[in-house]
Amino acid sequence: MQLAASVPSNCTTCLSPIPGFASYLSGTSPWPQGVGSKSTRSGKRVLKDHVASNPNVSPFRFHVPDDVLESIRSRVAAYPWHEMPDDGGWDYGTNMDYLKELCAYWVDGFDWRAQEARLNAFSNHTAKVDGIDMHFLYEPGSGPDPLPLMISHGWPGSVAEFFEIIEPLAHPERFGGDIADAFTVIAPSLPGFAFSTRPPRPWGPRRMAGAINALMTEVLGFDGYLAQGGDWGGAICSWLGFEHAPACSAIHINVLTMRHPDGPQTPEEVAWDAQFECDQIMQNGYRTQQATRPQTLSYAMMDSPVGVAAWLVEKFHDWSDIPVGDIESAHSKDELLTNIMIYVTTRCFNSASWIYYGRREEGGRILSPEGRRVEVPTGCAVFPREMLRWPPRSYAERLYNIQHWTEMPRGGHFAAMEQPGMLVDDIRAFARTLRR
C-alpha cells in the first residue's frame, strides 16, 4: 500500500493490515457485521431505505430572515468602539484593530446568503435521537462500496469546519484520487450546537457519543462505521470506540483529550505533562467559565454579535498554526464569519458551552478508572501546533489501540480548515488498513 503523495515523509504509520479486519469488513467474519456490511455500506441505499422512509428523519434547510440579518448588521455597525481601551495587540485577548476590520467587512462586504447556500447545497437532515432533533450533513460516497464515516466537530466550531473535506472524502475521484477510497460522510451538529436542538440540561461528550451512535445505527441503519474528530470530536470518538464497539469499528483523531488514571510514567511523559500544564495556564480562563458558570456569560453573548465574534476569533487565532502572526494566513474573513454567524443566528452560544459543564459532571478527562483502553483500531493525526499538546506515543498507546500515527509537518487545532488536504489523505491512509 502506498500513502497519498501529500502525506508527509515523517509519517510513522503502521501499514500492515489489522488482523481479522478484512473479513470483518466483508461481512464474512464471525464478529458482528461492521463497516462493510453489503446491506449498509452503500450510502445511497441507506439514504433511500433508512432516511427518506423514516418518520424520525426530516429534510432540513436553513434560512435566516432578512430582518434578522439586518438586526445583526445594525448591532455590529453600532458597536461603541470608542469605549474600548487600548488592547495591547493579542496579548490581552482579541486584537481590537483586527476585530474592527472584521466587523467592518461583516457589515459591508460579507455575503451571508452565499454561505447559507453553500450549507444548503449539502444534503441536510434532522433526526429524533435521545429526545432532541439532531441535525446532520449527509454525503453519499461514490462507487459501489463507500465506508460510512462520521466526522465530529467541537467548540468553537460547527459543521462549517468540514466544508472543504466532505466532498474529497466522499468523491476522491473528482479530486485526483481513487474511487476505492470513498466514504459516505455523516457530519452531525453536536447536541445544543447550531442546528441541533439543545438537551434539557448539559450533556458531556460521553452522552453525546451515545446519541451519535444511535443516529448512526438506529436511525441510519449502519452496522458499523468509522468515526473521526478533533477538539470535542476527539473525545466523542474516544467514547464511541470505548463504549460503542463494534458498531463504531475504528476511530481517527486529530486531538487527544483523554487521560490515563496512572498518569505519566516515563521521563518523556513527565516532561510532556509539565509542559502541557504550563501551556494551559493561559487557556484555562474560558474553559473554567464554561465548565462552571456558562449561563452567566451567555446573557452578554445573546445580545452581542461582536461579543460572540471576539470570543470565538480569539480561539481561531491562538489555536491555529499562524507563524507569521496573521490570522488570515489560516482562516479567511468569510470562514471566520460563517462560523460566527452560525452561532449568532441559531442563538446557540449558551447551549454550545454546556459541553464543558457536561464533561465535568461526567467525571472529566479520565477514560477508564480501571486503566482500560479503546481497543478498536485507532489512527492519530498529530498536528504540531495543536493547542492541546500531544503526549508521547507511549502514553497514547495506554489509552488506544494505535494502528496508525502520522506526525504532520504543519497545522494546528482546526485541522479540517487549516490543512484539509493533509487530514483527508491521512483519513484515507488509515482507512486503507481497515479495508483490506
Image (tube, helix red, strand yellow):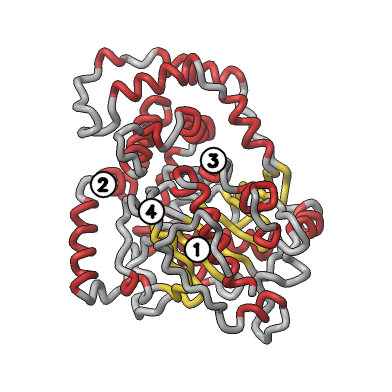
Q: Earlier in the sequence, mark 3 or mark 4?
A: 3
Q: Position of residue 368 (x, y in %)?
A: 38, 74
Q: Report how far apart the C-alphas of labels 3 and 1 lie in the structure.
A: 19 Å
Q: Quadrant of the rendered structure where residue 33 is?
A: bottom right
Q: Position of residue 141 (x, y in %)?
A: 71, 55
Mark 3 crowd level (few <14, some 14–19, many ≥20, 10 Å Cα): many
Q: Report how far apart the C-alphas of labels 2 and 1 lie in the structure.
A: 25 Å
Q: Which residue is mark 3?
A: 160
Query: Are the residues tagged 2 and 1 within 8 Å (C-beta)?
Result: no
Q: Which residue is mark 1?
A: 252
Q: Earlier in the sequence, mark 1 or mark 4?
A: 1
The nearer-to-camera label among 2 and 1 is 1
Q: Which residue is mark 4?
A: 409
Amino acid beneath label 1:
His
Q: Secondary structure at mark 1?
A: strand
Q: Is residue 130 left or right of residue 204?
A: right
Amino acid beneath label 4:
Pro
The nearer-to-camera label among 3 and 4 is 4
Placement of the N terminus among the 4 image quadrants: bottom right
